[in-house]
Every structure is written in structure tokens, then in C-alpha cells.
Amino acid sequence: MTRRPWRQLAAIMLLPAGVAAQAPSAADLERFYDVPSIVGTPPRAVTWAPDSRRVAFLWAGDGSNFADVHVTTLGRSGSPVTRRVTAMPRPASGLDPAPPRDGTARGYTRWRAQRAALAAELDRGVASLAWLPDARRLVIAFRGDLWLVDTEMPLAAARRLTRTDAAESGVGVAPTRPGAVPRIAFLRDGDAHVATLDGDSLAGERRVTRERREAGGIAAVDWAPDGRRLAVLDVDRSAIRTRGIPDYLGEETAMPSVRRAMPGEPSESRRLGVVAADDGPVTWLPVTEEAYDIVHGWQWSPDAARLVVDVSDVFVKHRRLLVAEVGRADVPAAAAVRALVAERDSGNVSAEWQVAWTPDGRGVFYTSDRVSDYHVWLAPLDGGAPRPVTAGPFAVFDFAVTPDGVVVTANPGRPEERHLLRVAARDAVRDARGERAPVTLTRGAGTHAVRVSPDGRWGIDLFSADTVPPDLYLLDLSAPDAAPRRLTVSPQPAFAAYRFTPARYVTFPSRADGATLHARLLLPPGRRAGVRVPLIIGSAYSNTARNQWGGRNAHPLWGLDQVLLEQGFAILAVDVAGSSGHGTAFRRRIRLDYGGIDVEDLHSGVEWAVREGIADPGRVGIWGSSYGGLLTTMSLFTKPDVYRVGIAGAPATNVWHALTGEQRVMLRPQEHMDAYARASSHTRAEGLRGALMLIHGMRDAVVLYQDSAWLVQYLLQLGKDVELVTLPDAGHGWDLEGSAQTRFAFRRMVDFFRRTLLAP
């Protein structure tokens, strides 16, 4: 039986009577990736008020990137009323209609006007928000300053709280009783500051840390539940080497320096401390063992006497859950730290970890893949072995603690989906087995990302599916069978004019080791059964077989894929080794093997599509970006009989130049030189026989443009067929940094695949 999204979710817009939806064409790329977007802008930063009766979020209902604050208020019966509560000043947009006629300066002046227009397009509006204890007012961060918003006042009534040269961010509000004077913590210039909200202004501002440095400083602040102390995370990047990335777009060529570590080099160091909001120095907690240990997360205990800290080495092979006894606010912090859980595993390659206290403070919930996949475990504070809270043939991706137990985001039954489940654990410290099997709280095939209210009664669901763009829905978690209530409508009216092809989800064995592979298949509309068509593997990456809008939504592929389908291509995205949601063993297949087992998994997808009579084996292409660019180039270089062409965006062809986080998979290069050589596709470039296009931004600090320039030079000396599409103003997210740039790059991609793969 075909699984469908909720009927009310799919019926986003209605066409006028007698008008049929049309399939996208190549010309629609221009419309799809223009501003405002026809699919709208997804809501973000969903934040519940302390009383669980109001929820705020950031959203641009007009399809632009500029988000204002919206608030949904729940009536006595739970009926929601949503309204926009801010109208923050928008930037001026559009090009200067009359640039000066001064010869050589004209072009640069015009360029500056274009830069201003691009900045206006990319302005995301309000950056963050936090509720005050009265559950009526919000503090928001907007263009580097703090503002006060009364949700019951008219639009444009926000009051400015700060006006400083340095930007404020990381706002946190002390959890005090309604009616008490609110206290606010925020970051500025690398330090934590605390101030009191006196009416409509801040008073008594005080800098509570002294950690500002040239490279780093306080990166996060977190109030204790009693509102008297703060946990602060200090990040020091001064040991990281600086590197120059040329900038050709000024009046003169410049060489800005960025701090960027490569595998095997010093990375950033972190330390966690506690400081009183009124006075006193920071007490730094001894939670790290090595200079570059990673603090993955922490949380205050309900009585504000302890912190649980999740920390590991930089390779994520030695994880520790530590409990720091910091005492009450009126007692000097002892800073005694003890280990609650320790996990050592040389095969681990991921850190999808989370930690939270039980409501009574007698134990700690945490995620671990110590058995079959990520699940929730419970570690009692008074000793005893950790016990599973969830178990079964699914993976847990997120969890939240409620007064009645735990709710988890998981993929039961369908690995490509995400649903919210409730796990009963009323007295979890004594009985972590739960009272019954998990109850699924969401319906409809797709991806549900739910923010649960503090009282556990309500959920705000950011839902999307293959043919349904993301929007917010209100869920009554006490009545799982009740229909969700829609809060936002992001797609613009023009969206209804198009018919989008849904995906199929398929499985097949890996040609390398027999592991079950999962993939997302799109077939061109109108294809007759048994007719072979050109196949594109892509976007190649991990975690691509997802039932959500755009598939791998790190890239805006929803429109590109549909246009390629209309050109007659089939598209297959494979969850390669290292992907989540398919078990611990599947994920760990990638250890020390970038460009190896993952490339075999992609090849397995080609073989399956040929066996099924879908793919023409002589017309197979591949594309991907970043790590996907490594997969693309490695596939072309090592399997020239399989792939005819490929497009590599920002390709990580030199793993020695990767970020230090890749050491989770590849370990230290000084000790694994052969593995780094095998994984770096530029070492296999002589094998290229087909056509290759590279797309790379010159401002990319994640994957260096230098690597693509080097590869092109090497390939042209070898007499190979290579094209380079240079984006002078792009960073690593080359298809997310301006609509004109996205349209330009996607046009080149469609044209490349048409002229290289459509011919027999």
C-alpha cells in the first residue's frame, strides 16, 4: 500500500477550476530559485513560553529570507491563534539605478551596488529569541542589538535595549517567578554579560567573564534553574594556524587570513565553568583530559547543585558522562567531578549524543549506540549499570524529557522517515524498562521534527515530505489520534501550478559486503515500464535517502531534481556507509575508508538500477558537493567503465586538507598516511576517462578552492576532459548564498548533464 502524507498537508494550495498543475521544465529553474521563493521559507527557532500556552517562532510568510517573530497562543480548548508580533525594519534592496560614469570606477561602483542588493536578499531578519518569565514578552537579537517585544502590543512596537558597536548574541533569560525582576545574560565581544530588565530598558549591566581574546572567548551561557549562576563555555582558537584565502572582488586583490586547522594540527580547546551572576570569578571545572577534548553538551540538575557534562576526545573514541558537584548558590563550588558513564570504542565514527537529567534529578538520560543503534539509556546517579529506556529495530535521533516520561524522534518501520514516540518512564530511576511499548504521536509519511511544550501536552511539528514543503503544525500529544492544526502556510500561490514527482524508497545489497543499502529513487514522469533512461547518482553524500522536502535538504535540490526528471533522467540517492538510522555496524563501515566502501555503495546503486531495467548502463552520471564531491571524483577516477560523466561541487579531493572533525573517521594523518592517500581522490586522477565539471567558490574556507585549481591543472596536463565553474563570491554553500548564483550554477549543471548524457 502506498503511504501518503496527511491529506490536509498535501493540499497546500488549490488551483482555479479547470487549471491543471504542470510538470517543471528547464525554464522553471529561474522561477524556482528566485526571491521570494515559491516554496516559501521554513519556520525556525520554535520556542515555547514557560507556561506552555504560547509558542514563538521566526518566519517570513512572504517567501523572502527576512524573518519576523510570530506567536501562536492556545485558547482554553487548545485552539491556536497565530499572529505576527514584530515588523522589524527591512534593508533597502535593489541596484543603484544610475552608477557614476567615471570609466574604470563604474564597474566597481556597480559591483558595490550588487553586493548591497545581495546583502538585502540574504538578510535573515531576527536572529534569535527568548521568552521572559511572564510568558508575554520576548527578548530578540536583531542586527547585533537586543530588543524587547510585547506580544500583546501592535506591530512595530519593539523597544531597543542595546545600541552598541559590538554585536550581542546568545541571549538567555534567568528562570525566575512571574512578577520578579527579569535578568538577562548575553554574549558580547567574547564575554558573558548580565543585566536586569528595568521596565523597557536594561539596567546594571555587568561583564561576568574576562575571557575575550583575539581568537575565541565565551561561546555559550546557560542559567542555572535557580537563576543565580551561569554555566559558561569558553572556546580558545588561538592555537589554530591562520591561512590566506585570496579575495579578488575588491578594488585591489587582498589576502584575508582565516583560522583553519587541518587534520593532525592543533584545533580549538574548550573549558566549562560556573560563575555567579552577581559577583565572583569563574570556577573552571576539570572535565577535559586533553587540550582538544570536545564538550558535546551539558545540563544543570533540577536543584541547581550539579552539572552533567558530555565530553570526549577529538576522535570521539573515548566518551565520558561526568557529574560536577558545584553545590548550591550559597555554598562555594567544590567543583568535584566524577565519571557517571565511560565508553571506549576504537571503532566509533560519530557523536550523535544528547544528555538530560530525569525530572527528579536522580538519574541521567543519554543517547548511545553501544548496542545496535542510537537509543536512550538511563544512568542512575547513585550507582548501578546504565539501563536501556528504548530498544528495538529503530534509531533515536533526538529526545526530550517531559513530566510523564521521554519522547523521542525515531524511525520505526521506515528508515527514511522521522516520527515522535512517547516512552513511559514515570519512575525511570527504579524502572527504566518503561510501562509499555512506545506510542507513535505523529502521523503521515515524512519527516516530523517536534518541539514539545514544557508541560509535555503540546508539540509544534515542523513537517515536510517529498512533495510537501516544510510548515508548522500543532499537535495535541495527549490525543495522538487528533488531527494536527496547521499554523503556517509557507508555499506561495505559484507553487500550486506545479506537479512534483514523488520518490520511491528502495533497498538492495552492497556489492562490497552484502550490507542492506537504502536509496531514494525518482523516475522521470511518463517513463514506460522497461524503458531504460539515463541515470544520475546524486546528490552523493551520507544521509540522502530521506522522505523530506528536497531529499538531502542541506542543498535546495527540490527544483533541480524535478527539472532533471523532466529532461528524462532518473535520479538515485544512496545512503552510503556512515549514514545514520541503519544500525551501528552499518555506520562504522566507513572507518578509515572515505572513498572506498562508500564508492562501492554508490556503484551498488548503479548495478541495482541496471538490473531493474531502469538505467541505461552507458549513460550514468554522478554528482555531489563537499564530501559528495570526493565521492564523485573518486567514482569517476576509479570506475570509468561505470560512470560517463560527473559534477563535483566544492569537492574534498584532498583529505589532508579536510577539517579536524574528519579525524572521527580517518584518525590522525601522521599515523595513517596510506589511508589518507587512498581517500584523497586527486591521487587517482589519471583514471579519468569521462567528462568532469567542477563547481567551486573562491571564498570557500571549508574545502579550499586551491584544491580544485590544483586538480584542474593536473588534469589538463594529463589531457583529461575537465570544466571549471568558478564562483568568485561563494563560500562552501555555493548554492545557498544568493539566488543569482544558485540559478547560474544549476543552469550549468542541467546543461552539462543534457549534453553529456542524453545522447545515446
Image: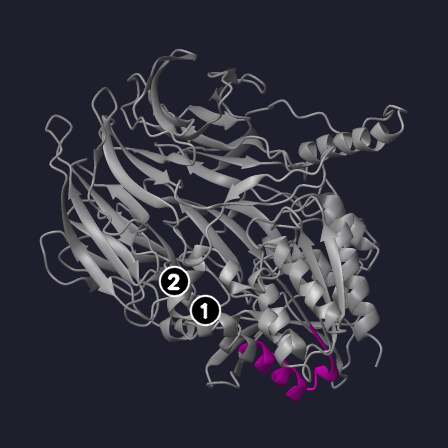
Q: Is residue 573 visible?
A: no
State the residue at coordinates (77%, 51%): 744
Does residue 603 sit above or below 388 in this rendering?
below
User: Badge 1 is on which residue?
Assistant: 578
Q: Is residue 409 visible?
A: yes
Return the x and y of residue 469 as percentages of the image width and height.
Answer: 62, 52
User: How packed is label 1: few (under 14 Cα within 10 Å), some, or many (20 or more)?
Assistant: many
- Asked whether the residues under the numbered discs 2 and 1 touch, taking CB atoms below 8 Å apart as contact, a structural biologist would say yes
For this view, does 322 lie left or right of residue 38?
left
* SS of the residue under disc 2: loop
For this view, does 303 lie left or right of residue 84?
left
Image coloring type = one colour
State the residue at coordinates (22%, 20%): 279
State the residue at coordinates (20%, 23%): 280
Return the x and y of residue 590 as percentages of the image width and height.
Answer: 44, 72
Q: Which residues are magenta?
A: 601-621
User: Badge 2 is on which residue?
Assistant: 350
For this view, does 83 lie left or right of residue 641?
left
